[in-house]
Amino acid sequence: MTTHNKNQKIFGKHFIFGSATAAFQIEGGADLDGKVESIWDTFCAEPGNVINGDHGLIACDHYHRWEEDLKRLQELGVDAYRFSIAWPRIIRGLDGEVNQAGLDFYQQIIDRLQAYEIKPFVTLYHWDLPQYLEDEGGWLNRDTAHQFTHYADVVTRHFGDQVHTYTTFNEPWCSAMLGYLHGIHAPGHSDRKEALTAAHHLLLAHGMAMPLMRQNAPGAQHGIVLNMAPFDAASASPQDQTAANLAGAENNHWFIQPLLEGVYPSLVMEQYPEAVPHIESGDMDIIKTPNDYLGLNYYTRQTVHHNPENALFGYDLIVPEGAEVTDLGWEVHPQGLTRLLIDLHERYDLPPVYITENGMANDDEYDEVLVKDDARVKYFREHLEALAEAMNAGVDVRAYFAWSLLDNFEWAEGYTKRFGLYYVNYETQERVPKLSAHFFGDFIRSTRSE
């Protein structure tokens, strides 16, 4: 069987292919049309937090160039576009004041997507918490979950079933762990108790918002997106095996197990009893409200080596010697996607799965006609093959989104890392297609051919 026919058979005409972005990473227009500050505006302004002092004030200027960017989606031939709405563009303060100009900005994007017959996949929260909420304690304050519910209600009432799929949160692990434990994302804290508390409030906000979202948009799909990876022991030693189990519990199952089973992993609770968050009666029932889908973002696997000198974790995450790595130093390990999906499928009663992000940072060199990113083409090809293997094994996967449509602001890495299908010259804002854009478009067309 040829690769072409194999892909056509596995993915089929109803499988959704798309690309994804996030508001803070591409929009710019940081103070235009009523938008207020986010925690990332504040974080970027603090020297030393972001490489080169980079910020999101202009980013890819998508706020003014959205028509050009959506045209590129049409040229790719994608079925869907996954983008986030900036909470600080929609709700201006603690009193819940709605900014109509913010809703209007996203309305024009949704209208154009519908004209192109591209399904809008809307993420409500991709890390850009309004600063006025951070001033009240951010995700350490339980009231932020209620504030999110109001925001989700406003957005889903306005757009309703114009949106194909709503996501409450993108990667709550990053918001909680990178923001409150590792200290490398906004708001830059380093405390496990805070991290697990933030995680609980993020998941609680998801569960609180879901009934209103379903009521407001009964024809849409509603769910959440988690970033996950296999956590493999660096050796067969009992110490490495134990460390890998703990790492998997804290980084994967702390987020998926409460969503699907209504409990947190006992291994984490027992390992860090002093860090267990305050859980009110009924919280876990709220968190495990059913999801129409589960989004999974996959980039790499994690190899775990026991290290008692690491006071925070008791282990290190290492890259095996000789492994192929991306420009971020992440191991290229497509078979990890197959294993992750099959393992989750066997362990949990999963809803339909969407692969909502997959891609790599590559050291792309500018070319005015076509950027040749052969490593990224190889990455996408191998991961699509790995996805097909999981689907053949019985995992119900219904969508795949390439990260990202554009090179963009890569959080603490600033503009030094490029993930896009299109190269962005940040001085001129020129967009140039990469070889991977042609590959992805051709791949999509191959699955649609007779």
Image (cartoon, rainbow, N blue to C red):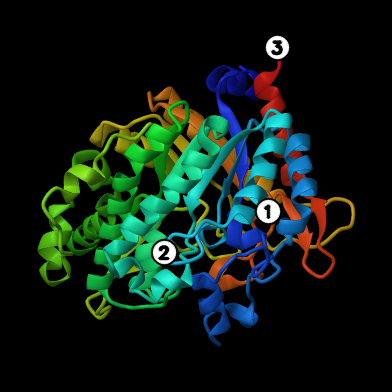
Residue 450's label in the rendered image is 3
Residue on which the image places disc 2:
95
Q: Residue 225 appears at what percent x and percent y?
A: 42, 46
Quarter of the image that includes the C terminus = top right
For the residue pair 304 and 255, the one nearer the viewer reads as 255
Q: Residue 361 appears at what percent x and percent y?
A: 61, 59
For the residue pair 76 and 113, the one nearer the viewer reads as 113
Mark 2 vs mark 1: in front: 2
Q: CA distance from mark 3 to mark 2?
A: 55 Å
Give me the residue at 50% from left, 63% from top.
128
Q: Quadrant of residue 109?
A: top right
Residue 278 visible in rendering: yes
Say which amino acid is labelled 2. Answer: Asp
For the residue pair 40 and 377, the one nearer the viewer reads as 40
Above or below 189: residue 217: above
Q: Residue 8 appears at what percent x and percent y?
A: 61, 19
Q: Residues within 10 Å of mark 3 (few under 14, many from 20)?
A: few
Above or below 428: residue 229: above
Query: Which is more N-terminal, label 2 or label 3?
Result: 2
Residue 373 visible in rendering: no
Residue on which the image places disc 1:
420
Query: Which is more N-terminal, label 1 or label 2?
Result: 2
Say which amino acid is labelled 1. Answer: Gly
Residue 394's label in the rendered image is none
